[in-house]
Image (tube, rainbow, N blue to C red):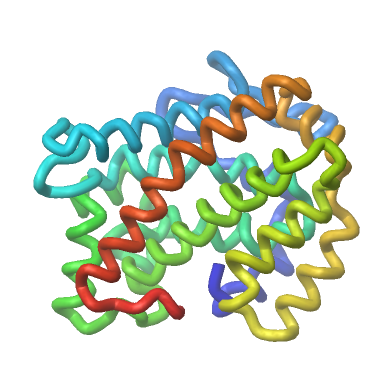
Amino acid sequence: MGEESFSSSSSSSSPAESVMETPGQSLMATPAGSFRDADEGTPLAAVAEAFEELARSLRGGGGEEGGDGGLRLAPFVDACSLVSVLFGCLGFAFKFAEMEYVAKVRCVSPFPLQSRLVNDLIEASKAYETLIHIIDHDIKNDSVRRQGSHSRNLRRVRLGLDLIRALFEQFLSTNECSLKDAASTAYGQVCAPFHNWAIRKTVSAGMYALPTREQLISRLNETDYSVQKEMQRYINASSPIIQYIDDLFLSRNIALDW
């Protein structure tokens, strides 16, 4: 969620048009702008389940997806690609996040300049086995913070995951909390410290175009009860993943102020 690619969102398609499909799962837009999982459940439930799988792999330590080599890239990007649906449901205010997030997920590949055109998430997982390999590769080439580097893309994707986590926490804090208030607080906590004044002002103006609390629940095909359950599942499951990514950088003496 850095500021370097914010301008690219100005010519982007609508949120519904930029939803990504992942192997084995089709996410379809409805005329009202909501999304449904064409196979089973809801998009929010699919996101929660995917991150619960990642969290289980971390807790397992020696599991197939965890182990000494760390979190595997393939299941990580599969889970992250599902989150783009949530950005799409939020409208203009989070368009900057959706466009950058989708681009960064696609750019976690060995060919950052071509990845938006020819590489997909499966190809990325073939190139790098784990998140550790991405960071260590960039450390070796002194390119961790370089614009377009895999580590920088990973860092931005991590901010996107945290933005959704913080928004959900605010959304669930009280039944009276509007989506605008929840999103404004979440943005201020997670992304605003890395954005310049112009971007912060644009995002602030866009907050007034956010759907209402009830509209968001409807777009996600949830109920008042189910949305609380699924959001809490994501919060619980994504937190250790976010911390894991932070620890990968910090354990290599890479600060998180970028």
Q: Give how far across and how far down residue 258 sits, in percent.
A: 45, 79
Q: Give how far across and how far down residue 135 sits, in percent.
A: 24, 66
Residue 146 relative to residue 217: left or right: left
Residue in view at x 13 percent, y 40 percent: 67
**In the figure, residue 39 lies in which quadrant?**
top right
Q: Give how far across and how far down residue 72 sits, in percent.
A: 23, 44
State whether residue 198 is above or below residue 69. below
Residue 210 relative to residue 108: left or right: right
Residue in view at x 47 percent, y 65 percent: 156
Residue in view at x 29 percent, y 62 percent: 247
Q: Give how far across and how far down residue 37 sits, in percent.
A: 60, 22
**In the figure, residue 204 lies in which quadrant?**
bottom right
Q: Is residue 111 at least partly visible in the picture?
A: yes
Residue in view at x 45 percent, y 43 percent: 238
State whether residue 51 is above or below residue 205. above
Query: Which one is in front, 32 or 239?
Result: 239
